[in-house]
Image (cartoon, rainbow, N blue to C red):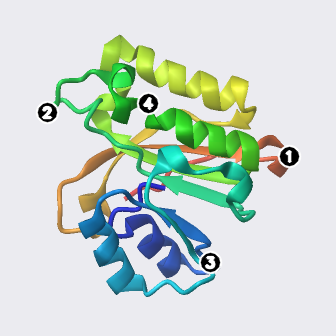
Amino acid sequence: MFAGIGGFRSGLTRAGGFQCVGHCEIDKHANASYQAIYEPGKEERYYPDATQIDPADLPDFDLLCGGFPCQAFSLAGKRLGFEETRGTLFFDVAEIIRRKRPKAFFLENVKGLLIHDKGKTIQTILKVLREDLDYYVPEPQIVNAMNFGVPQHRERVYIVGFRKDQNVTEFTYPVP
């Protein structure tokens, strides 16, 4: 979800063993780049607007990836959080997780998410994922892409979760 030009897809393609079944991106220029880079066929569904996705229409999948919009949580923005439409898009992600029950999810956002509204925002997100959706979710971690060979200082918070029947009880984020 919120595919941009396909950063998650690039990483998963390099890791191997994954097949993308769909992507969502509202920005037509980012989606045009995504289409040019990956040339998705008919087997990959495209959804232009996350708020219009009917989970019943989605194919089954094991892993949901998404960099839900960060402007509402960024130190550079107005920091309106859940009071702004873009800030509520996390709940669209949560609804898809609730309805499709993937084995795991991998979410990304700006590091300001951790301190937004004095930590209340991340606590709400974690409550939804852990309690309402019943996933094992370790503490989110800030990771800087430049420590993993990317030529850019890009600190982001990562949130991973595993459906409890996957029996994952420990998770360690990668170390540079």
Q: Tag 2 or tag 1, which sits nearer the N-term?
A: 2
Distance of label 2 from label 4 (alpha carbons): 18 Å
Name which residue lies at 59% across and 84% down: 42
Q: Tag 4 or tag 2, which sits nearer the N-term?
A: 2
Name which residue lies at 58% across and 81% down: 16
Distance of label 1 from label 3 (alpha carbons): 22 Å
Name which residue lies at 43% across and 59% down: 48
Instruction: For marks 1 and 4, give the one nearer the viewer.
Output: 4
Residue 19 position, x and y percent, is: 62, 78
Q: Residues within 10 Å of mark 1 (few under 14, many from 20)?
A: few
Residue denoted by label 4:
88
Amino acid type of the residue tagged 2 in the rendering: Ala
Q: Residues within 10 Å of mark 3 (few under 14, many from 20)?
A: some
Please state if 53 lies on the left or on the right of 34 as rendered.
right
Q: Tag 3 or tag 4, which sits nearer the N-term?
A: 3
Residue denoted by label 2:
76
Distance of label 1 from label 2 (alpha carbons): 39 Å
Front-lying residue, 161 or 124: 124
Q: SS for tag 1? A: helix
The image's mark for residue 165 is 1
Distance of label 3 from label 2 (alpha carbons): 35 Å
Q: Tag 4 or tag 1, which sits nearer the N-term?
A: 4
Distance of label 1 from label 4 (alpha carbons): 28 Å
Residue denoted by label 3:
19
